Image: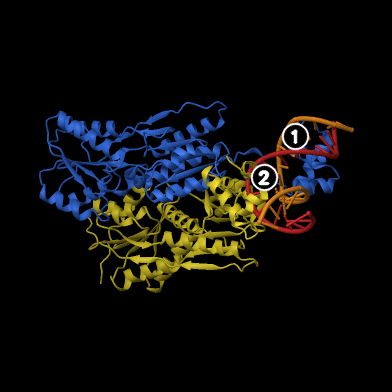
Chain colours: A yellow, B blue, C red, D orange
DNA sequence: TTGTATGCGTTATCAG
DNA sequence: CTGATAACGCATACAA
């Protein structure tokens, strides 16, 4: 690595002259600047970022902590984050919590000691169920945090949330009022998460308002839920609509319904939570409540950058990114 | 942030005493150690990683540059990388090249100036087609690089590759010999990538050895290739097997074949390239050549860590991770 | 056993 | 216009 010192020695000037020349300071004469920049280019000098970071106590790096990258929703959010950060010359350190509280804590502990200027996080399942929030509280004293999707209300930080309640409420009402469905099943495998609860609440409200009966199939953390779905469908032949509150069980329900000889959407309307590529993976194309992962990522990153670049301690914001209802071939378009 | 200096002042000892005490040096007396560690814990002292990095000129951070995270294969690889790095107390900075040469170069330029100890990369499409490799050559002089999947033969570095040729050759032969298929279509949308070429070559070899006729549908970079697939299938009713060399066009072909009234796998066997979750997304479950993304990630990370931790300049290795043939319900099991 | 001095590479302040 | 000096926080060779 070529350093300022080496350039200085070769040019018989001082280190500070070189430094100023390279940052095009008005203090330095044109001819010196030329000599310096020429040699710097020739030797391909690049300032050492670690040294700059130590000096400025800013890293231009953001820590991103997500439960998983295999979940397309999170992958999409991370993509949105990276795009926004990149256009502001920030990098990101990605940690995967694997839904584990301990891994999440380790990531925060490690990165909060100077490695990053701020955090963007979707809290792990275990963190949410055990409600252990010390690592967030500790860090947030010195370092801004933005939470998205999986959010903890009692941590003081900015948040980007999804209109989980409303989107499922609207969807369920759509099924009831526009499609005249009466036996609507909700399938859940994330009922222990706050977002899961909101979604179930939205469904319940719509069903009860219409005087219908709620039917909820909770799959818990079952690794292969397909048999459970199949059995339920087999024993409830009168179902005429299914709402899945995650991205994969909807597809499973679709496939199982077809196996049972159901016509879709004539016999059963099916909708799931989705993401950009959801349309490719089922036939007929499943309807989705599109969570706009990319936008959520962009918004989270912008929110964080705002906090990082404002001198005065900025007030925490909570922004809602509305999901988009994409009615494809598994719901009657009316 | 509490620093060594502050601890030293509070304890009326020197900075170096504190430093040594905290690293449990044998030079320091037990009682002093106790006093120091107690106060350090009380004030929640954590060494500033940036300062440590500057001192040691090691960051314990790896730069990971991938074309996309929305492609489940890359997401899986990154997950494997993160797992391995994490268990060795390394972090990773993830950059997404978006298949763009320029973005890839920027990432390498930025991170190679002290920010990371090494790189793991799958080269961008544009980099491969334009064959611009200067940024790799420059960096590799000072910083180890491991390439995976998308590999450049003329860059001197370690590589983790997939047995693309062999896996498609074997699959095609399976269709021919065990299932007695005669009209086998290969669908490609990555023919300009080295891995795409290998896969097509494997197919071609098997077909020609059997005295059959090759049929290759090249989709290029078409954004919505489904109509192209549909038309091809409609005009070639005699197809009895399809090999897709990426993870999504196989699913599309499956769905289009069903639309055309084909029974699967009786009329047509279908196989695609896949990843861990592929089995969930189609009905019947599509057969896949499973690329073992997680293992590729693990292997890449291990290879890099080896280079980073060996004093002597280690010889570059190339490791092949073999794909696994998962015959599900879209291929006759014999 | 503890402390002093130096350096990692950069930037900023101040003096010449 | 240029240069010397100090500082960011830590670690270590060397003194005491």
Q: Is residue A160 left or right of residue A216?
A: right
Q: Where does the C terminus of chain A fall, quadrant-wise?
A: bottom left
- Residue A64 vs B171, above or below: the answer is below
Q: Residue at x 82, y 34 (%)?
A: B30
Q: Residue at x 52, y 51 (%)?
A: A92
Measured from the top left, where is residue A171 in percent x and y? 36, 68
Chain letter for mark 2: B
| Cα–Cα span, label 1 and label 2 | 19 Å
* Quadrant of image for the N terminus of chain A: top right
**Chain on which label 1 sits:** B
Which of the 4 image quadrants contains residue A77?
A: bottom left
- State the residue position of label 1: B24
Nearer to us in this view, A174 or B190: B190
- Bin the neighbour count of mark 1 within 10 Å (Cα to Cα): few under 14, some 14-19, many 20 and up: some
Residue B224: x percent and y percent? Answer: 25, 56
User: Residue B172 at what x, y percent from top left?
Assistant: 21, 34
For mark 2, give the secondary structure. helix
Mark 1 residue element? loop
Mark number displayed over residue B51: 2
């Amino acid at each position: 690595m070529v350093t300022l010192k080496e350039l200085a020695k070769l040019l018989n000037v001082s280190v500070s002259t070189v430094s100023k020349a390279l940052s095009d300071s008005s203090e330095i004469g044109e001819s010196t600047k030329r000599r310096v920049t020429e040699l710097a280019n020739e030797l391909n000098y690049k300032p050492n970022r670690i040294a700059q970071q130590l000096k400025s106590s800013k890293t231009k790096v953001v820590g991103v902590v997500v439960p998983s990258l295999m979940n397309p929703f999170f992958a999409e959010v991370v993509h949105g984050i990276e795009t926004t950060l990149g256009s502001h010359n920030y990098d990101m350190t990605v940690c995967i919590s694997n839904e584990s509280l301990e891994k999440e804590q380790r990531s925060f502990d490690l990165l909060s000691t100077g490695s990053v200027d701020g955090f963007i996080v979707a809290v792990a399942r275990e963190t949410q169920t055990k409600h252990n929030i010390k690592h967030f509280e500790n860090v947030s004293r010195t370092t801004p945090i933005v939470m998205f999707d999986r959010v903890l209300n009692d941590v003081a930080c900015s948040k980007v949330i999804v209109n989980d309640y409303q989107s499922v409420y609207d969807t369920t009402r759509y099924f009831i009022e526009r499609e005249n469905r009466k036996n609507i099943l909700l399938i859940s495998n994330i009922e222990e998460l706050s977002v899961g609860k909101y979604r179930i609440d939205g469904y319940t409200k719509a069903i009860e308002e219409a005087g219908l009966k709620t039917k909820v199939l909770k799959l818990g953390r079952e690794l292969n839920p397909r048999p459970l779905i199949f059995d339920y469908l087999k024993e409830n032949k009168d179902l005429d609509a299914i709402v899945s509150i995650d991205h994969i069980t909807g597809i499973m329900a679709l496939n199982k319904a077809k196996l049972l000889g159901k016509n879709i959407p004539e016999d059963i309307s099916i909708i799931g939570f989705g993401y950009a590529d959801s349309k490719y993976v089922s036939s007929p194309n499943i309807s989705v409540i599109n969570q706009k992962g990319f936008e959520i990522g962009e918004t989270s990153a912008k929110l964080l950058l705002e906090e990082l670049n404002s001198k005065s301690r900025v007030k925490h914001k909570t922004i809602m990114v509305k999901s988009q209802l994409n009615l494809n071939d598994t719901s009657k378009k009316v």
